[in-house]
Amino acid sequence: MPTLSFCNPKGGSGKSTTCILMALEIARSGLSVVILDSDPKGWLSSWAGLKPMPPGIEVRQVQQSDLTGAALEAAEQADYVLVDVEGSADASLIDAVLVADLVIVPSQPSRMDDRIAQSAETKSHLGPGYGIVLPSEVHCRDRY
């Protein structure tokens, strides 16, 4: 089944929040989803422990070294697999990109995120997979 990885080497870009919202919408449509939380801080897993998860959503805390195997296993058990990674440019980010059918790069309206987004768009053309840059926050200016 499709595996979507939420990646951005910058922390605080909205990866976990976007991942959660995507999982809720997938489950709302009647499909099952496994979220793999590979962030050592386990923010998403902690969030999932606050209250019962809606039907169709399972959150699993996984070690970065186990991500590939966990993603393959989850793909056999659910309609969608979502991977949340920590904000860093280490091996966990690379592994998350390699297991993904689609890489989603949440970004804030900032110069740093703009550079990351441009880099992600360029890299998405190099491999067989696809990438999408998703603004996770929009600032509007009142022009009146």
Image (tube, rainbow, N blue to C red):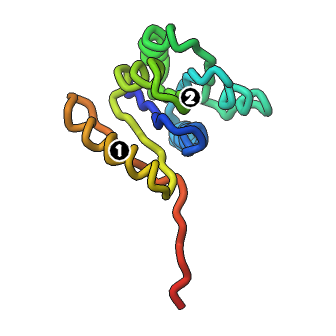
Nearest to the observer: residue 70 or residue 13:
13
- Left or right of 61: which side holds 143? left
Residue found at the far bottom of this picture: 144
Q: Quadrant of residue 132?
A: top left
Nearest to the observer: residue 63 or residue 115:
115
Q: Which residue is mark 1?
A: 132
Q: Which mark is residue 86?
A: 2
Please name the residue shown 44% across and 31% down the image. Answer: 5
Q: In this rendering, does residue 55 appear at all?
A: yes
Label 2 SS: loop
Classed neighbour count for the residue bearing mark 1: other residues with Cα under 10 Å, few (<14), some (14–19), many (≥20):
some
Q: Quadrant of residue 43?
A: top right
Label 1 SS: strand
Please name the residue shown 54% across and 32% down the image. Answer: 87
Please name the residue shown 51% across and 53% down the image. Answer: 108
Classed neighbour count for the residue bearing mark 2: other residues with Cα under 10 Å, few (<14), some (14–19), many (≥20):
many
Compute the Cα span from label 1 to label 2: 18 Å
